[in-house]
Amino acid sequence: MVKKPGENKVLEVKNLSFKHKKQKDYVLKDISFCAEKGKVTVILGPNGSGKSTLFKCIAGIWEIDGGKILVDGKDISGFSHTKRARIFAIVPQEHEIAFPYSVFDMVLIGRASYIGLFSTPSRRDYQKAEESLKALEIYHLKDKSCTRISGGERQLVLIARALAQEANYMLLDEPTSNLDFKNQIRVLTMIKRLSRERNMTVLLSLHDPNLAGVFADQIVMIKKGSVLKTGKPSEVLNEEVIKKLYDISVRVWQINSFRIIYPVVEGTGEKI
């Protein structure tokens, strides 16, 4: 199939470094990778490795100290927050919503960058909110309070809100961290489908290498603020690399196209 011009646009991070003000040590050091359209790139690493910090730097919440962030080949360092909001749709970690917004109103908030300060939502804004709810298969929840739905449903609402932004790049910071196994699979399946159907560049962080192996097209492994290894799941999810990443011994079983990773007790070969 002949590819059309512009189909291979990417989010490119080049030699990115970051440190907090008044601190000498860098939180992120010389981070480089590319995330392609229509694919899911997973940032994989242990707690404290810098995954959330990286997302905040890409989103423009924190100003980087070195390197570049390129979108479609353009350096976005000087872009305003409003302009970035039309480029990046951000989904935070699942959290309790204090104010009892309806599901529909929560998704409509995703249209904020298109609505003037003293304006009201247009017909198009309402239409995009409805389309996003239908795309995530949660339209039946539209009139319910966000405080009265399950954690998995709330996470899908946040993804629908991001989808309503009509951004080509979606950033999801540990979207499954507080979900049970069923909802982890449900949320990640939806994310994977959206990346394919909408040709979106999806960048998400995970803790679990098994989930990364199933849903990622590419994995960027980060440890102590630096890239340890980057590649397809089949290239990086092996016993040697995972031990370096998490400092534990594991065994990897290959079953058809899937890899199952489980920890072992050092020196015994027994499963934990």
Image (tube, grey):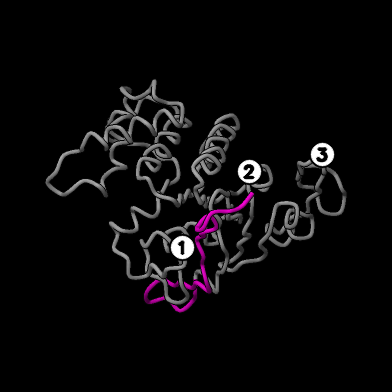
Residue that carries the numbered disc 3 in the rendered image: 255
Q: Main secondary structure of the magenta part?
A: loop
Q: Report crowding for label 1: few under 14, some 14 to 19, many 20 or more residues within 10 A (C-alpha).
A: few
Residue 72: image tag: 1
Q: Going from the N terminus, do you reach mark 2 or mark 3 first?
A: 2
Q: Residue placed farthest to the left in the image? A: 118
Distance CA(mark 1)–CA(mark 3): 37 Å
Residue 191: % across, % down: 53, 40
As shown in the figure, which amino acid type bears the numbered disc 3?
Ile
Nearest the eye: 86 or 173: 86
Q: Going from the N terminus, do you reach mark 1 or mark 3 first?
A: 1
Residue 85: % across, % down: 33, 53
Distance CA(mark 2)–CA(mark 1): 24 Å
Residue that carries the numbered disc 2 in the rendered image: 215
Nearest the eye: 162 or 252: 162
Local secondary structure at mark 2: helix
Q: Going from the N terminus, do you reach mark 2 or mark 1 first?
A: 1
Q: Which residues are magenta?
A: 1-26
- Looking at the image, residue 208 sits to the left or right of residue 195; the answer is right
